[in-house]
Amino acid sequence: MGNPLAQSRRNDRAALSGSKSQSEPLYPLTIAYFSVLHLLPFGAFLSGVTRASVVACFVLYIVRIFFITAGYHCYFSHRAFKTSRIFQWILAIGAQTSGQGSVVKWAAMHHYHHAHSDSQTDLHSPKQRGFWYSHMGWLLNQRYESMICSYPKYLTKFPELMWLNKYYYLPTIVLAAVTWAILGWPGLFIGYGLSTVLTLHATFSVNSLAHLFGTRRFDTPDDSRNNWFVSLVMLGGGWHNNHHRYPRSARQGLCWGEIDITYGFLTLLAYSHAIWNLQTVALPKNREHRIAERWLTPAMNSSTCAAGRDGNSETFQQSAVRSRVR
């Protein structure tokens, strides 16, 4: 297998030349939006940086990454757990403060990605269009709008979610206004601006880096990979090969050492009964794998995880045979 980065660069050049022939129209408003967001942190050179703005940046990054991974991804896209209508509303608002659009459209695009992952019709495949296109270039044209034919019916039945779908920009604008009102210009530039840019690129790295670099435990039909760096910045959302094998599992870190902070928080929420029916991958209880209710311990599945790291997914696939609702 060749160098993935070199292959990605060749795909980038092909995408640049191919885009001219495909005549994909650009979204001027989207380009302006991303440009303003990326310029916003530079305002700190004029306003200065305060300790409170740095703390706000860190807190808003962690909180919004959780809402992205647990909300946009696990709940709205894959229904990996159930919750009340009120907490569903909280998840939706929290996710949309990240500036990534409505949860309804996000879920629709994610469904399309799983159905066409790394094929020629995938919305953001580095294999097909190169690194930068898969990272964020796909958002700058109108192609993805034409590819999404319908929204998930299990979400469109909620009027409040459809209201957020119409006014998708309100949560992130309100957050920006609040950080400015409380912390002044440093709060807007660093607390909101820098943390938003970081959350965007962390999320985008799942589409780009996690389809180029990392290990493959499962022989999935796409190029998804388990990437420790993406997992770190996405609070567990970078064990991407695991996820493509078991998309409805709320737990993406399946083996010892695959830290999944988001799943840890979801477990706490399940204990508090804020959510329930948290779906995970279960191992069979047999003589070879004597496991407790929570099987993620060093001794329990060290052989299966080691097999996955060595590129042999057969052992793990035989033991992780089903998804369950707990």
Image (cartoon, rainbow, N blue to C red):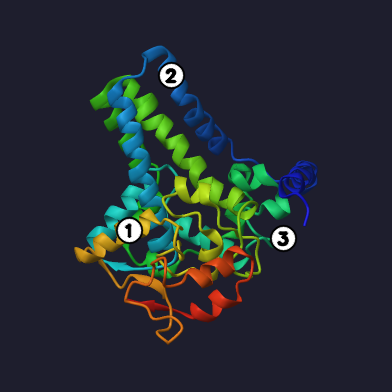
Q: Residue 164 in the image: x percent, y percent?
A: 35, 51
Q: In which quadrant will I find the N terminus?
A: bottom right
Nearer-the-camera pick, 295 or 143: 295
Under circle 1, the secondary element is helix
| Outermost residue, left side | 272
- Image quarter for residue 318? bottom right
Work out which quarter of the rendered image holds the C terminus and state it. Answer: bottom left
Q: Name above or below for residue 183 compared with residue 235.
A: above
Q: Quadrant of residue 45?
A: top left
Q: Is residue 41 visible?
A: yes
Q: Residues within 10 Å of mark 3 (few under 14, many from 20)?
A: few
Above or below for 315 versus 200: below
Pinpoint residue 59: horizontal percent, then vertical percent: 31, 38
Residue topped by disc 2: 43
User: In this view, which residue lies farthest toward the top?
Assistant: 46
C-alpha distance separating marks 1 and 2: 36 Å
The answer to whether residue 94 is left or right of residue 219 is left
Q: Are marks 1 and 2 in contact (CB under 8 Å)?
A: no
Disc on the earlier residue, 1 or 2: 2
Structural distance between the alpha carbons of marks 1 and 3: 36 Å
Residue at numbered disc 3: 120
The three-letter amino acid code for the residue at tag 1 is: Gly
Question: Which numbered disc flags the more N-terminal residue, 1 or 3?
Answer: 3
From the viewer's side, name the closer residue of 49 and 292.
292
Residue 67 x/y as whole percent: 36, 51
Dot 3 falls on a residue whose secondary structure is: loop
Say which residue appears at 47% left-offset and 31% top-offset.
37
Label 2 residue SS: helix
The residue at which mark 1 appears reads as: 264
